[in-house]
């Protein structure tokens, strides 16, 4: 196809404003004109013509080099590959129109053979928007992704080209997040110190009022209290980006996922600890919890259930404590999937929060769909709860909201999961028991089942875990007496010579002590008899 280089003068006639072109008196000067190129491109599908044009070259050599580059790009598509020819032509037309740098020949060859976009101008921000728009998961999950994208990914790497995103860029992003955390902590400390100092200034007196006014003005211009981006959130940001880039690979937009290779600090999941007497005493003295995840002993669990026996939602607390349902699963459990005659219920849905809004949803994973066996006492509790609910329905009459759920508000409408958590915390506070979270009742249920000798597979199925390792690693908080029993049982399996000698020495010492005791007793008896026979004066 036709293509050429040519000189061009951009001088204009001061009267008409038209380009002088070849009539410019300075045209023959060596450095006056610039060079341009034009290359005919394959016509569009409708037959219309198009071309690649570019100017401003300082020398003929530079112009010819770019013209050769354009022709080399056109030669990448074989003549018997009309689709490839059109893709190359569209790429060159876009590069010419948007005045983009000419693409690398080998990179373009690779992209063409891999079926990828030839012009990699798509930014990370544009791809993330496209990826989010195509997500077909529950609303709360999309909201979490949107938060990661809006707060972290777009501000740090949104303007970068998707195909040029590198591991180093992500390392810089997480370093910047860590640096921002340090700044937030310092600003929070400054604001907290100012607020505490303000609280010490008296209200009365002209000088005090003026000082308070000045301090309030200074506090108002300080940054507000903010939360830092913790390790768990950073891991979630990485997971969000990794999922988005994996889909870009699946659509052959990129071939490498840098999020799969960037290293950040691992998340250390808190271990569940049991509220032993020593830990309770320490908590009573300092108010500090040994771990974010704490589990009641069987006695403490029983004390709580006795304390809330008259609560309208007692059956919910009982069910979570013994069978380990999640909060959303308990709130969304329908009577139609609760078979008290067969001593079982089937978990088929849940109520989840999106912000403060509540929506019905299926279990998050396939293992969440499960049948949970019920003991006799739990069945009795649920039967009593159903009778009370029937009485409430009759009392409310036509105003009753028939949701068909086991646990509802007084009028039959949905329970708000967040309000259920708040109610549980108030009840725990009023009970004078050491604090736990509502979700920790689930930890306690797992611990009780494992302590009772239930096979870990059955415990895992009851809790709705996809793998028994999750049950062992997260939920198995060993109760003190269970740990002591297992330690004694283990020790008895190993025959030790020093143990036999120690036992022999202990028996010998016990025998000697017994003889000494008998001897002392006999001497005391003789002394007593002598005293009795001694004549009175």
Image: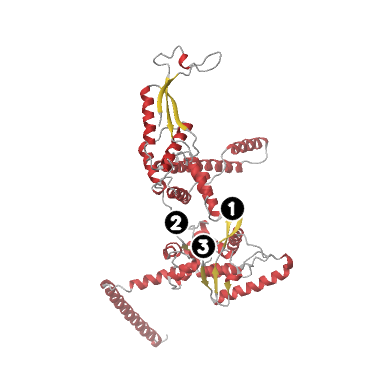
Q: Element type at marker 1?
A: loop
**Mark 2, residues whose alpha carbon is within 10 Å: few (<14), some, or many (≥20)?**
few
For disc 3, the marked residue is 440
Q: Quadrant of residue 53?
A: top left
- Please report the residue visible at 28 percent of the width from the left and 76 percent of the height from the top: 504
Measured Cα–Cα span from mark 1 to mark 3: 22 Å
Query: What label sits on residue 355 in the rendered view?
Result: 1
In the visual, does 374 lie left or right of 504? right
Distance (Cα) linking label 2 and label 3: 14 Å
Residue located 27% across and 72% down the image: 496
Nearer the observer: mark 1 or 2; the answer is 1
Q: Earlier in the sequence, mark 1 or mark 3?
A: 1
Q: Secondary structure at mark 2?
A: loop
515 on left or right of 375 = left
Residue 255 appears in the rendering: no
Q: Relative to 303, is 143 above or below?
A: above
Q: Earlier in the sequence, mark 1 or mark 2?
A: 2
């Amino acid at each position: 196809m036709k293509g050429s280089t040519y000189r061009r003068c951009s001088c204009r006639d001061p009267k008409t404003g038209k380009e002088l072109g070849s009539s410019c008196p300075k045209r023959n000067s060596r450095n006056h004109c610039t060079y341009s190129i034009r290359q005919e491109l394959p016509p569009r599908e409708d037959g219309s013509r198009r071309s690649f044009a570019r100017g401003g070259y300082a020398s003929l050599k530079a112009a010819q080099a770019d013209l050769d580059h354009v022709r080399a790009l056109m030669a990448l598509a074989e003549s018997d590959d009309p689709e490839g020819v059109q893709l190359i032509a569209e790429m060159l037309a876009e590069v010419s129109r948007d005045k983009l740098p000419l693409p690398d020949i080998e990179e373009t060859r690779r992209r063409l053979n891999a079926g990828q976009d030839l012009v990699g101008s798509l930014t990370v921000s544009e791809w993330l928007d496209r990826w989010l728009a195509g997500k077909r998961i529950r609303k709360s999950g999309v909201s979490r992704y949107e938060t990661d994208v809006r707060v972290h990914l777009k501000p740090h790497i949104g303007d970068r080209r998707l195909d040029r995103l590198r591991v180093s860029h992500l390392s810089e992003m997480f370093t910047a997040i860590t640096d921002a955390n340090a700044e937030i902590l310092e600003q929070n400390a400054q604001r907290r110190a100012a607020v505490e100092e303000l609280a010490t200034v008296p209200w009365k007196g002209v000088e005090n009022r003026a000082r308070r006014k000045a301090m309030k003005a200074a506090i108002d211009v300080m940054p507000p209290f903010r939360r830092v981006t913790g390790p768990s959130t950073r891991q979630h940001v990485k997971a969000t980006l990794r999922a988005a880039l994996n889909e870009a690979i699946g659509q052959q937009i990129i071939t490498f996922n840098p999020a799969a290779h960037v290293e950040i600090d691992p998340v250390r999941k808190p271990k569940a600890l049991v509220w032993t007497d020593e830990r309770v005493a320490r908590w009573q003295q300092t108010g500090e919890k040994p771990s974010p995840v704490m589990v009641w002993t069987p006695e403490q669990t029983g004390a709580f259930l006795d304390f809330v026996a008259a609560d309208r939602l007692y059956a919910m607390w009982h069910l979570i404590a013994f069978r380990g349902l999640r909060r959303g699963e308990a709130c969304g459990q329908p009577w139609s999937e609760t078979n008290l005659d067969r001593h079982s219920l089937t978990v088929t849905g849940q109520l989840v929060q999106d912000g403060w809004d509540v929506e019905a949803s299926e279990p998050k994973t396939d293992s969440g769909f499960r049948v949970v066996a019920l003991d006799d006492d739990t069945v009795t509790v649920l039967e009593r709860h159903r009778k009370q609910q029937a009485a409430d329905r009759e009392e409310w009459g036509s105003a009753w909201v028939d949701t068909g759920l086991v646990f509802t508000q007084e009028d039959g409408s949905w329970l708000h999961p967040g309000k259920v958590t708040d109610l549980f915390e108030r009840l725990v506070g009023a009970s004078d028991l050491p604090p736990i979270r509502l979700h920790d009742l689930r930890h306690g249920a797992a611990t009780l089942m494992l302590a009772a000798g239930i096979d870990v597979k059955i415990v895992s199925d009851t809790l709705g875990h996809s793998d028994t390792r999750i049950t062992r690693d997260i939920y198995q908080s060993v109760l003190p007496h269970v740990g002591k029993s297992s330690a004694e049982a283990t020790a008895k399996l190993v025959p030790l010579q020093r143990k036999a000698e120690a036992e022999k020495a202990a028996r010998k010492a016990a025998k000697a002590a017994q003889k000494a005791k008998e001897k002392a007793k006999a001497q005391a008896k003789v002394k007593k008899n002598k005293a009795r026979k001694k004549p009175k004066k």
